[in-house]
Image: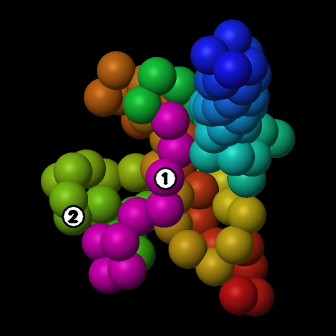
Amino acid sequence: MKQKRQAAIRVGLRCCGWLAAAWVTMQPAAAHEPYTSFMTPFGRPCCGEDDCHPLAKGDVSVVRGGYFIGSRREFVPETDAQPGPDDRYHLCTFNGLRMCFLIPPAGT
């Protein structure tokens, strides 16, 4: 009886381990999914160590010649912006440096 119980516990732990591993490996892919097709002007992927994320509503102001990201106190020239995946502004960084700045596509 004790051996059956121990065997059942081992099977349960293996199953939980596989499920946890599958969940962990799927998370980064889901986080990167909307950004995988975006590239920097130098041909490198936008996703970096700090990844990409949508900016808070109202954080970006359209100013003469580009955009101003209030939370970063950073000006982004219009030439550095590219159409993003939806109607929000997105920022991709690597080691704190801006890699890509994504804007809502025209007409949204």
Q: Is residue 88 above or below residue 107?
A: above
Tell me the number on the disc at residue 32: none
Task: Tell me which numbered mark, 2 or 1, is placed earlier along the sequence.
Answer: 1
Tell me the number on the disc at residue 53: 1
The C terminus appears in which quarter of the rendering? bottom right
Residue 95, quarter of picture: top left
Q: Report x, y in % for residue 47.
A: 60, 31
Q: Nearer the viewer, residue 102 or 55?
A: 55
Reply yes or no: does residue 24 show up in magenta. no
Residue at 40% over, 64% down: 55
The N terminus appears in which quarter of the rendering? top right
In this view, the mark in front (2 or 1):
1
> In this picture, which residue range is highlighted in magenta?
51-59
- Disc 1 residue type (three-letter): His
Residue at 35% over, 28% down: 97
Q: Which residue is mark 2?
A: 70
